[in-house]
Image: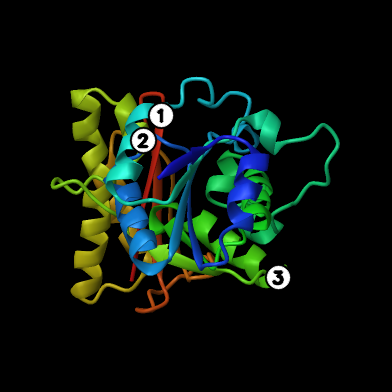
């Protein structure tokens, strides 16, 4: 495995590699959710690249960019143990220019849910991914379903820009207690970790209601909100797979999404039905 920190080094490596490339874009602080993506990437591609870049373009001014967890040595060791070919760790001066054309996520997908709370966030996500995709030209790129809205917006970019990349959605990885793994979980103390379990419990409640025949979205939301008390809820949404809100559950075409604040930490979770 090699660690590359500059565009020039990356380009030199890619010039010598005509094999199929898989990419796992990350912001580091790797956990078992990332590990599952990386394992899939390594197993399905001749060359596997993991990017580690805390992307300033996707953070709002008041968000946690400066304190976002950074564990470079541990991340490199994890990638090495998993058989990754290349870890790409650029800095922002490598990735961004003062005057560059910008990319904008479509409003109907990017101004709802996460985008309502974090305006411009998905523009920043697409900005950096567009660069990674153009630089690396992967055959396959791996994204977790935990960031469902991001996944759908990235799929839209790849489709509408005619990019020759397969976007591979990967299931959420959870701790034994049901908590969806997230780098931001490290911000939580023990009491807050217990409170965070309300997210997955609300989704389990929704699933049980649906299995019992309840298909009315509002009724399901009401019971989910009861479980989420007393947390500060950003949203509970029940949508189709294009993120349009639905009044009635349609199995095979429904996503239930939730976002809450636990102290100063914002967590998301979802389930695809």
Quarter of the rendering containing residue 264? top left
Q: Residues within 10 Å of mark 1 (few under 14, many from 20)?
A: some
Residue at 22% over, 32% down: 193
Residue at 70% over, 70% down: 160
Q: Which is nearer the eye, 227 or 148?
A: 148
Disc 2, SS: helix
Q: Residues within 10 Å of mark 2 (few under 14, many from 20)?
A: some
**CA separation in Å, label 3 and label 1:** 34 Å
* Sooner in the amino-acid sequence: mark 3 or mark 1: 1
Residue at 35% over, 44% down: 79
Q: Residue 107: image x %, image y %? A: 70, 56
Q: Residue 5: image x %, image y %? A: 57, 34
Q: Residue 273 has which mark?
A: none
For this orientation, the residue located farthest to the left is 176
Q: Mark 2 points at which residue?
A: 75
Q: In front of the other: label 3 or label 2?
A: 2
For this orientation, the residue located farthest to the front is 16
On the question of residue 111 being in view, the answer is no
Q: Mark 1 points at which residue?
A: 72
Disc 1, SS: helix
- Circles 1, 2 touching at the beta carbon (< 8 Å): yes
For residue 11, above or below residue 158: above
Q: Which is nearer the eye, 270 or 174?
A: 174
Quarter of the rendering containing residue 74? top left
Q: Which is nearer the eye, 169 or 239?
A: 169
Q: Residue 78: image x %, image y %? A: 30, 40
Q: How crowded is mark 3: few (under 14 residues within 10 Å), some or many (20 or more)?
A: few
**CA separation in Å, label 1 and label 2:** 5 Å
For residue 27, above or below residue 46: above
Q: Name the residue under label 3.
A: 160
Residue at 31% over, 33% down: 185
């Amino acid at each position: 495995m090699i660690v590359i920190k500059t565009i020039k080094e990356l380009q030199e490596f890619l010039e010598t590699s005509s094999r199929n490339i898989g990419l796992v874009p990350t912001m580091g602080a790797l956990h078992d959710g990332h590990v599952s993506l990386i394992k899939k990437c390594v197993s399905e591609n001749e060359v596997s690249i993991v990017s580690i870049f805390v992307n300033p373009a996707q953070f709002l001014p008041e968000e946690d960019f400066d304190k976002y967890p950074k564990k470079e040595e541990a991340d490199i060791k994890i990638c090495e143990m998993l058989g990754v070919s290349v870890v790409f760790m650029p800095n922002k001066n490598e990735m961004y220019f003062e005057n560059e054309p910008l990319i904008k996520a479509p409003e109907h997908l990017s101004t709802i849910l996460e985008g309502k709370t974090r305006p411009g966030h998905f523009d920043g996500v697409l900005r950096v991914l567009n660069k990674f995709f153009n630089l690396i030209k992967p055959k396959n790129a791996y994204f977790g379903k935990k960031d469902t809205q991001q996944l759908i917006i990235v799929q839209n970019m790849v489709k509408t820009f005619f990019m020759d990349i397969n976007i591979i959605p990967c299931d959420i990885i959870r701790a034994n207690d049901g908590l969806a793994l997230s780098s931001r979980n490290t911000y939580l103390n023990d009491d807050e970790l217990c409170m965070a379990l309300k997210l997955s419990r609300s989704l389990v409640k929704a699933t049980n209601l649906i299995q019992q025949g309840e298909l009315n979205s509002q009724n399901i939301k009401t019971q989910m909100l009861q479980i989420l008390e007393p947390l500060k809820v950003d949203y509970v949404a029940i949508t189709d797979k294009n993120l349009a809100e639905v009044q009635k559950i349609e199995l095979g075409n429904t996503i239930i999404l939730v976002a809450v604040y636990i102290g100063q930490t914002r967590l998301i979770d979802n389930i695809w039905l």
